[in-house]
């Protein structure tokens, strides 16, 4: 009997050959937003390794939306050419190329993790950051500028323009990043959003920016191609965004035409107490799938094929997003098939190694 993990899933006009997704993970290897051969080899090797969907790391919709100076971007037409070569290679392997579009908000302008990850001052190569309110993420950070009406309109327009460029670049799926304490999440959470206008206060106001971004992206993104949204299901902090609100939002996003909720958590405040453990976020994907009636993806310490198979077999989610486990093993899907005693297509170049 074929495993659930290696069974296909069709979303709109795209059929994923299995349920294994490479989760977006920053590589901090770009310059001025441009992809290079590192990205081609990194994403290409995971497509060769059998994953059905490769979602490119958080790709900034504007220069000020980058987490670090080494983030990928899609705010310049000149970014498109290299991305086209990456998507073309992924698709030749029978995988689907997706992209996560993002704006870091108050968590922008930081050094790369290997250099400490602290927020950079302007004389260190940093830049002005923006958020829902003028509240810094860390006490030592510069307070971000609160976005005014024109600033909000620019953010929405930047997501729309990036979505259009994503289509030109050959991506077949977009994920809007509304999690991990980045800009859209900063509007969703009462911990960071202290506004008194139409974008703050009530639940309906706090979700407004995300809904407006989704609406504008849909005007340029083909209706036959999937649109995902990644959310943090909870802030893991008192008074913050919570799973009840996540379910409520997911119902609305489904009504707005979003195809899948990528269910992560945390990232809003540095003092959050997160009970990290194997599959610790799967319950969020399960609840949102059942209560909102929308496809979900589960992510977070899912590290082997048997664990992933059990989650899917229990009906808790529809896709398994592999993050650090795929950094350790680009061929997670090929090895997983063997562990599950199932079959999976290998690249022709590697056929003689298939036992």
Image: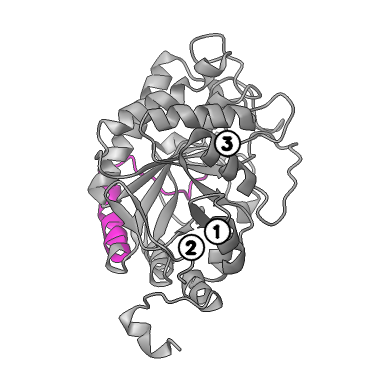
Q: Is residue 57 above or below residue 162?
A: below
Asked if the magenta segment contains residue 160, the reply would be no
* Majority secondary structure in the magenta region: helix
Nearer to us in this view, 10 or 232: 10
Position of the C terminus by quadrant = bottom left
Mark earlier in primary sequence (2, 1): 2
Task: Judge from the rendering whether residue 232 lies leftward or rightward of residue 277; answer left or right.
Answer: left
Instruction: Tell me residue 24's x, y (percent).
Output: 48, 52
Name which residue lies at 71% across and 36% down. Answer: 236
Quarter of image, res 196: top right
Mark earlier in primary sequence (1, 3): 3
Question: Which element type, helix, strand or loop, lies under badge 2?
Answer: loop
State which mark lies toward you, 1 or 3: 1
Q: Is residue 112 above or below residue 341?
A: above
Question: Mark 1 highlights which residue?
Answer: 313
Name which residue lies at 26% across and 45% down. Answer: 167
Instruction: Tell me residue 260's x, y (percent).
Output: 43, 42
Report the magenta residues as a range. 68-90
Task: Judge from the rendering whether residue 353 lies leftward or rightward of residue 111; answer left or right.
Answer: left
Instruction: Tell me residue 244's x, y (percent).
Output: 62, 28
Question: Which element type, helix, strand or loop, lies under badge 3?
Answer: helix
Q: Is residue 294 above or below residue 212?
A: below
Residue 4: give its label.
2
Spatial separation of the CA atoms under disc 1 and disc 3 = 37 Å
Spatial separation of the CA atoms under disc 2 and disc 1 = 6 Å
Mark 2 and mark 1 residues within 8 Å of each other at the beta carbon: yes
Q: How many residues crowd mark 3 within 10 Å: few (<14), some (14–19), many (20+)?
A: many
Question: Mark 3 highlights which residue?
Answer: 107
Quarter of image, res 91: bottom left
Asked if the magenta segment contains residue 78, the reply would be yes
Query: Is residue 187 at all visible to an observer of this figure?
Result: yes
């Amino acid at each position: 009997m074929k495993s659930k993990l290696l069974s296909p899933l069709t979303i709109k006009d795209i059929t994923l050959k299995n349920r294994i997704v490479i989760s977006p993970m920053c590589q901090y290897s770009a310059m001025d937003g441009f992809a290079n051969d590192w990205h081609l080899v990194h994403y290409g090797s995971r497509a060769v390794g059998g994953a059905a969907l490769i979602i490119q790391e958080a790709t900034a919709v504007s220069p000020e939306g980058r987490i670090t100076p080494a983030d990928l971007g899609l705010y310049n037409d000149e970014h498109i050419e290299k991305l086209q070569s990456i998507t073309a290679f992924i698709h030749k392997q029978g995988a689907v190329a997706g992209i996560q579009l993002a704006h870091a908000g108050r968590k922008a302008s930081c050094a790369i993790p290997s250099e400490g990850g602290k927020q950079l001052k302007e004389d260190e190569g940093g830049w002005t950051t923006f958020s829902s309110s003028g509240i810094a993420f860390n006490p030592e950070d510069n307070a971000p500028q609160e976005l005014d009406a024109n600033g909000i309109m620019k953010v929405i327009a930047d997501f729309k323009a990036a979505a259009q460029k994503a289509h030109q670049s050959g991506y077949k799926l977009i994920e809007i990043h509304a999690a991990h304490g980045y800009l859209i999440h900063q509007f969703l959470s009462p911990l960071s959003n202290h506004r008194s206008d139409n974008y703050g206060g009530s639940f309906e106001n706090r979700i407004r920016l995300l809904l407006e971004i989704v609406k504008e992206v849909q005007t340029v993104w083909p209706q036959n191609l999937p649109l995902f949204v990644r959310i943090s299901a909870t802030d893991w902090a008192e008074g913050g965004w919570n799973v009840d609100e996540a379910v409520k939002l997911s119902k609305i996003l489904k009504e707005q035409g979003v195809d899948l909720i990528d269910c992560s958590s945390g990232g809003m405040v540095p003092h959050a107490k997160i009970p990290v453990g194997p599959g610790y976020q799967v319950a969020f994907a399960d609840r949102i799938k059942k209560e909102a009636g929308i496809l979900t993806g589960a992510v977070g310490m899912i590290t082997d094929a048997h664990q992933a198979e059990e989650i899917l077999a229990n009906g808790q989610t529809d896709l398994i997003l592999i993050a650090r486990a795929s950094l350790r093993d680009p061929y997670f899907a090929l090895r997983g098939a063997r562990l599950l005693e199932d079959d999976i297509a290998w690249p022709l170049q590697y056929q003689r190694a298939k036992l």
